[in-house]
Image: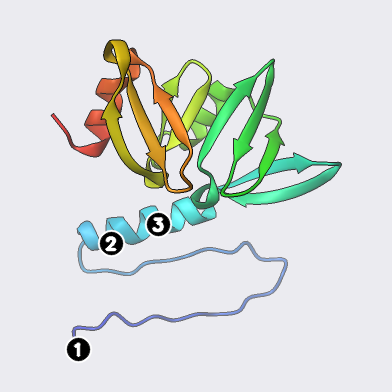
């Protein structure tokens, strides 16, 4: 037996449900990382833009924001409307790199390039696309915890 993990792909009939099966001797950090990555890639949010429906991967989402009773999803260059409420999205994404940053926003931690303290206990997060998002005071401990900061 070599050290390399064997990777097999089997094309199946369209009527069958697709699945990914991992056979391993033990579930270690590497296996958990692979599973997390697959789950994130697998999570799709439907975004609406001019009567068109787009399938958006969670890994392409920078943040969600509620504005005037509607919820929008922000990607690198595009904004889409989503039908879910913010609390539903929070539930859906909470295990997947996202966290509530304020009453009206949920940020994707994977898209944060830097954070720094702002006024009155808040933090500001700079995202990979240069956008800035405020992290409210009550959510700062959550962010620090998720980033492994004390």
At 54% across and 80% down in the image, what residue appears?
A: 10
Residue 51 in picture, x, y percent from top left: 86, 42
At 50% across and 42% down in the image, what residue appears?
A: 62
Secondary structure beneath disc 3?
helix
Locate the N terminus and report the quarter of the image it occupies.
bottom left
Residue placed most toward the observer, 86 or 14: 86
Residue 96 in picture, x, y percent from top left: 41, 42
Q: Quadrant of residue 134?
A: top left
Q: Quadrant of residue 89?
A: top right
Sequence order check, earlier mark of 3 and 1: 1
In the rendered image, the vertical position of residue 69 relative to residue 82, given as above or below? above
In the rendered image, the vertical position of residue 25 relative to residue 148, given as above or below? below
On the rendered structure, is 106 left or right of 1?
Answer: right
Q: CA distance from mark 1 to mark 2?
A: 17 Å
The numbered disc on residue 92 is none
Q: Which residue is mark 1?
A: 2
Sequence order check, earlier mark of 3 and 2: 2
Q: Which residue is mark 3?
A: 37
At 66% across and 46% down in the image, what residue appears?
A: 78
Label pair 1/2, CB-CB below 8 angstroms: no
The coloring applied to the image is: rainbow
Residue 99 in picture, x, y percent from top left: 40, 30
Q: Which residue is mark 2?
A: 31
Q: CA distance from mark 3 to mark 2?
A: 10 Å
């Amino acid at each position: 037996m070599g050290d390399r993990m064997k990777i097999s792909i089997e094309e199946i009939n369209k009527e069958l449900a697709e699945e990914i099966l991992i056979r391993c001797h033990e579930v270690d950090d590497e296996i958990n990382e692979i599973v997390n990555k697959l789950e994130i890639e697998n999570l799709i949010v439907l975004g609406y833009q001019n009567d068109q429906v787009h399938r958006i991967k969670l890994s392409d989402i920078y943040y969600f924001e509620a504005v005037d009773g509607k919820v929008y999803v922000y990607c690198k260059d595009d904004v889409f409307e989503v039908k879910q409420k913010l609390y539903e999205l929070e539930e859906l994404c909470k295990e997947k790199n996202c966290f509530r940053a304020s009453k009206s926003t949920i940020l994707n931690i994977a898209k944060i390039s830097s954070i720094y303290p702002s006024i009155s206990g808040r933090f500001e997060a700079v995202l990979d696309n240069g956008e800035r998002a405020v992290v409210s005071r009550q959510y700062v401990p959550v962010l620090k915890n998720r980033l492994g900061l004390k």
